[in-house]
Image (tube, helix red, strand yellow):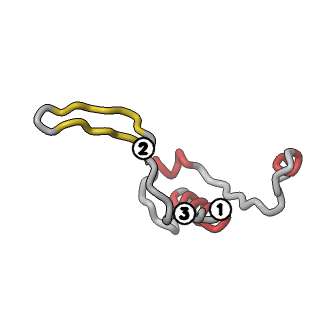
Amino acid sequence: RDLLSTYEFPGDEVPVVAGSALKALECGCGKEDCQWCGKILELMNKVDEYIPTPQRDVDKPFLMPVEDVFTITGRGTVATGRV
């Protein structure tokens, strides 16, 4: 928290969850009461609480950057991209 405050982040307000992703992967049970997997679930709950869901512009047209274009015989040309 001190390090966060040093770099002008809200160190006293940022949620901190101590756990081990490696131990959670090794366990793999995914149960909330598990010592390791529970911490990952707690972390994701804290992320959901702390980071607001952005407002989407649903009234504007859909824009997708084109990453690649394929020509498929008998079908035509297909553009692919990432949303």
Q: Is residue 12 left or right of residue 26?
A: right
Figure quadrant of residue 70: top left
Per the model, the C-alpha gap separating discs 2 and 1 is 23 Å
The residue that disc 2 covers is: 82
Residue 46, compared with residue 80, is above or below; it is below
In percent of width and height, residue 76 lies at 19, 37
Q: Residue at x 36, y 32 (%)?
A: 68
- Kindly identify the amino acid type of the residue bearing the numbered disc 3: Arg
The residue that disc 1 covers is: 51
- Which of labels 2 and 1 is toward the front? 2
**Callout 2: SS:** loop
Per the model, the C-alpha gap separating discs 1 and 3 is 15 Å
Figure quadrant of residue 47: bottom right
Per the model, the C-alpha gap separating discs 3 and 2 is 17 Å
- Which of labels 1 and 3 is toward the front? 3
Which one is earlier in the sequence, the residue at label 1 or at label 3? 1
31 and 82: which is toward the camera: 82
Q: Residues within 10 Å of mark 1 (few under 14, many from 20)?
A: few
Which one is earlier in the sequence, the residue at label 2 or at label 1? 1
29 and 5: which is toward the camera: 5
- Kindly identify the amino acid type of the residue bearing the numbered disc 1: Ile
**Callout 3: SS:** loop
Do callouts 3 and 2 mark residues in contact (Cβ within 8 Å)?
no
The residue that disc 3 covers is: 56
- Kindly identify the amino acid type of the residue bearing the numbered disc 2: Arg
